[in-house]
């Protein structure tokens, strides 16, 4: 037997440090003879944002990438295989089989505990050095079918900012997204009590704005204030300003045939490589996830106005990336650089709550 129970639990612990949309941690694990089984937790999926379960699948990919890396760090070989879905199951379960043949140890494994979403402002003038940016792009192995472009020129940066701004306008004017977001927000002691969701302390916004955000929970109030410009303030402070403060904006894309699980593995590798280079990182997930809904789900649940905004956003990000291969899908726009201040880590639920 390649690994004992404690070793398997260490590998699960590295898995749950992965990112998930709104820190929903929608995963289940069980220990098997050969290793660990990993699947989605049906009780924790289904947000509007999670169009076609793309966010859940990306998160599962990131979890499995962490687990493969951790197995290598513990001198074990590891192989991942999808298991046939059982009746009524919407997503496959993945089996991580452990062996005594260690693969090459990947230095990214050492950076799993430090990886985090840094939502504060960055130092615009402190450009990461070329080697750091090259090392981040080099973290993508060919078989994942993803590529990374940096938006260097003024026009490309503005194009990405505009694309994210337009998607944020959809986000802040959609009643279901509004409800989901407020359901996931945790203020004060709630964060420690639930150990999931979005801890307001990790949002990277001015303290003064936190009680205001809390007051905006009722949709009729937010909707009325949107009519006098609130949505523009939210989109400006939510994505535009943080992007403007970042010296480097990246666009991660995938070939047309790549699935969300592999996209999540690629995103995690890029994120870990940025962490290894000492850089802060924030993904801007509203645009790619809403584009999944607009394109793959025929715009289900979106108004005509929302669809129009997303069409414009789709054009804007594509124009910002020169020489984009035909059919390339957007995985994630992200910003990276040196943060102005330290930020708190988000929490994870106790390990027992993930184990079947
Ligand atoms: C598919 C996906 C989309 C995400 N979108 C955003 C986003 O739009 N903005 C953001 O600040 N964080 C985003 N995140 C990061 C999560 O909110 C974050 O991983 C989670 O809160 C846990 O925090 P951590 O990354 O610091 O461990 C996204 C993560 C995933 C996997």
Image (tube, rainbow, N blue to C red):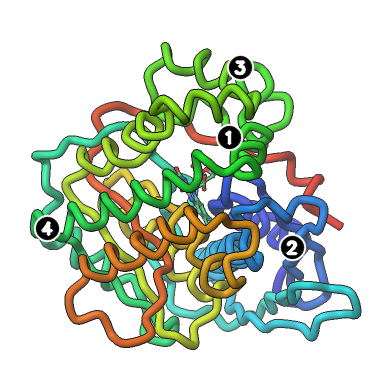
Label 2 residue near ligand 1, CB within 8 Å = no
Q: Residues within 10 Å of mark 1 (few under 14, many from 20)?
A: many
Residue wearing tag 4: 155
Which tag, 2 or 4, sits closer to the chain's start? 2
Above/below status of 158 relative to 213: below
Residue wearing tag 1: 198
Front label number (3 vs 4): 4
Res. 229 image quadrant: top left
Q: Which residue is painted at 36% across and 73% down in the image?
A: 253
Q: Nearer the viewer, residue 323 or 337?
A: 323
Spatial CA span between label 3 and label 4: 40 Å
Q: Is residue 336 left or right of residue 8?
A: left
Label 1, secondary structure: give it: strand
Spatial CA span between label 2 and label 4: 40 Å
Q: Position of residue 326 (x, y in %)?
A: 32, 87
Which tag, 3 or 4, sits closer to the chain's start? 4
Which tag, 2 or 1, sits closer to the chain's start? 2
- The reply to whether callout 1 and callout 4 are in contact (CB within 8 Å) is no
Q: Position of residue 185 (x, y in %)?
A: 61, 30
Front label number (2 vs 4): 4
Pick the quarter of the image with the C terminus: bottom right
Res. 207 image quadrant: top left
Residue wearing tag 2: 40
Front label number (1 vs 4): 4
């Amino acid at each position: 037997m390649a690994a004992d129970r404690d070793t398997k639990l260490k590998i699960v612990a590295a898995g749950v440090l992965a990112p998930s949309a709104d820190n929903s941690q929608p995963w289940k694990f069980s220990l098997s003879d050969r290793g660990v089984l990993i699947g989605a937790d049906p009780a924790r999926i289904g947000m509007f944002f999670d169009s076609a379960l793309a966010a859940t699948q990306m998160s599962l990919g990131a979890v499995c990438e962490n687990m493969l890396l951790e197995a290598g760090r513990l001198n074990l070989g590891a192989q991942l295989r999808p298991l046939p879905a059982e009746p009524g199951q919407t997503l496959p379960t993945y089996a991580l089989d452990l062996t005594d043949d260690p693969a090459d140890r990947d230095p990214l494994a050492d950076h799993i505990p430090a990886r985090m979403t840094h939502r504060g402002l960055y130092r615009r003038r402190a450009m990461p050095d070329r080697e750091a940016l090259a090392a981040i792009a080099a973290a993508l192995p060919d078989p994942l079918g993803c590529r990374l472009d940096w938006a260097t020129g003024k026009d490309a940066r503005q194009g990405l900012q505009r694309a994210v701004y337009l998607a944020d306008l959809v986000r802040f004017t959609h009643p279901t997204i509004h409800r989901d977001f407020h359901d996931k927000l945790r203020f004060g002691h709630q964060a420690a009590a639930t150990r999931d969701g979005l801890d307001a302390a990790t949002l990277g916004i001015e303290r003064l704005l936190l009680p205001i955000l809390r007051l905006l929970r009722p949709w009729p109030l937010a909707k009325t204030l949107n009519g006098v410009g609130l949505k523009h303030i939210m989109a400006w402070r939510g994505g535009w300003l943080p992007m403007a403060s970042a010296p480097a904006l990246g666009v991660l894309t995938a070939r047309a045939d790549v699935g969300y699980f592999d996209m999540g593995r690629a995103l995690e590798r890029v994120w870990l490589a940025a962490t290894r280079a000492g850089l802060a990182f924030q993904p801007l997930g509203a645009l790619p996830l809403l584009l999944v809904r607009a394109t793959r789900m025929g715009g289900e649940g979106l108004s005509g106005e929302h669809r129009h905004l997303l069409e414009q956003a789709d054009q804007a990000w594509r124009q910002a990336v020169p020489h984009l291969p035909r059919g390339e899908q957007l995985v994630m726009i992200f910003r990276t650089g040196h943060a102005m201040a330290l930020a708190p880590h988000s929490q994870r639920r106790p390990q027992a709550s993930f184990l079947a």
